[in-house]
Image (cartoon, coloured by chain):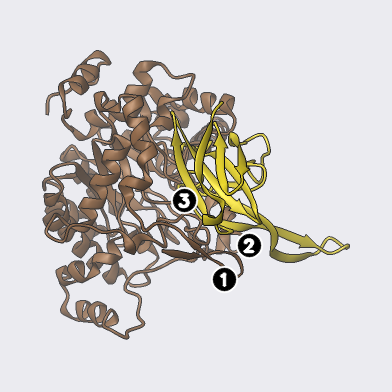
Amino acid sequence: MDLIADRGRRVQVEELNTTKLLAHAAKQTRDKKFDDVLVVDVDAHHYENESFGEILPYMENDVLKQLALASRAKGGRGNVAPSGFGYQDMGGRVTRYPLRSSEKTDEKGPHRDIQLGNRWMDAMGVDYSCLFPTGMLSIGLHPQKEMEVELCWAYNRWVTEKALPESGGRLFTMLSLPFSDPDACLRHVETFGDRKGVGGFMVTTVRPKMGVYDNAYMKVYRAIEERGLVLSFHSGPSWGDHTFQSCNRFLSAHALGFSWYNILHCTNWVVNGMGERFPKMPVIWIESGLSWIPFVMQRIDHEYMLRPSECPLLKKKPSDYMRDMYYSVQPMEIQDMGALETTFRMMDAENSLLYASDYPHWDFDLPSTIWDLPFLTDKARHNILGGTAHKLFKLPPRNEAQKANLIKYGNYTAA
Amino acid sequence: MAEQFIGKASEFKDGDRQIVRIGEDEIGIFRHEGEFYAYSNFCLHQGGPACEGLTIANVEERLRPDKTSMGLHFTNDMNFVCPWHGYEYDMKTGCHVKDKSVRLRKYDVVTKGNDVYVVA
């Protein structure tokens, strides 16, 4: 296929085949013997808008459903869900974006997204992936609370009833919560919390206003904790946000945005003593990289010592509560190895860090980014790549070698 | 070091590329402005197929003498881009366009008559 390069010049590249594109990842998998290591990817994606034809009929409200379906009719110009500005594909430089539709899958096989997922998981040596949507990460920007509720409901039904059952158990999810409506969030937890493949619930942190500490959410957190599930906060960019309108390059809005929204809500979470209120509920902060963590730890520990009257629920330093939570690794900033090592030490990465690929997005990380870090112990490597996630999500090893390694490094728990 | 036959020079149009496997390495051979360039196909970032993506002109930001920006422009220098994450390498040197210390292994290419060989 031809791709458009500079000045309209056309460059011929092969049509997309994920297995072929990731052949070098498969070589790493063989060379590093990742088949012997349980690798759990806690943040991977699909493009759910490509399946809206299947998803939208699950909406409950007839009028909103008609609006959504009609907006997608041939010739329609409506947008069902919020969409952001940006150039994730870098002008076609990251070829899997423009070539995505060219990839062939078996029409008689499982859902196309499952087939594509199996291809990249097999190449990377990933055993299980937590599947998240892409466009729906901006659902918090929808001006209609009721449409946010409807779209989350429809997606959560579709993914648990249609997509995940076809994955053979290798894909699981943390379902999107319509955080603008706490009562609806509770209904989602009560309806979907016990379904197969649901490891927890996810709040997208890209929102114009959100108070994770609001009393209205306590019943939601309690319901998640009671079920032994995980709560995660997934970040994202929002170039149109007032804060980022000063950025004239996507790089700036992207680099800052993904960290910023989790910085904001993690700070509120910690300062309001949520770790004291729900100590048994695992909380994961997803897709913000790692370099923000030492910054926030230093920053709020410092102010905590000066202003303890503003956080009376805390019984230890804010950074201690941060170490009680979990963080997905991607996109890991491997630039200053000393700084990265310090970050790992400060966050107790051996026990708090979870491998994530973010595939197929443009800044994905392979398992080797963890495996090859020179300062990690073998136990830390195994914990981060899958051992810690195995305990959180109760995912069984897929072979005896993986089981032996889980036992060796103290991670094995019977499902 | 041995010479590995790649193909006939007449079969390479300007802008063409070919990927060959030699031993443990994969090598990408480009023909650009009549010259051949050959580099390791393993990106120095995460090991992606560095030579299999888009080729695209370098981008520069031009400034006026008073330091005000004239915006972004393509230059006549050509880069090739790893399709995994966008690591962008200079066609003539194999260096990352912003960090010259990040440099792909370069292979010599020799032509004998109409035959093209890579030395690896």
Residue closest to the far front: B113
Q: Up-down: is A139 above or below A334?
A: below
- In percent of width and height, residue A301 lies at 53, 31
**On what subunit does the disc labeled 1 rest?**
A
Q: Which residue is mark 3?
A: A261
- In percent of width and height, residue B38 lies at 57, 42
Q: CA distance from mark 2 to mark 1?
A: 24 Å
Give me the disc on residue A248: 2
Viewer-proximal residue, B101 or A350?
A: B101
- In percent of width and height, residue A227 lies at 15, 40
Residue at the (45%, 41%) spot, across then down: B20
Instruction: Using a 10 Å C-alpha cutoff, classify the residue at mark 3 as few (fewer than 14 neighbours), some (14 to 19) or many (20 or more).
Output: many
Q: Does residue A273 appear anywhere in the picture?
A: no
Picture quadrant of residue A394: top left
- Tag 2 and tag 1, C-beta contact below 8 Å: no
Q: CA distance from mark 2 to mark 3?
A: 19 Å
Residue at the (48%, 48%) spot, across then down: B18
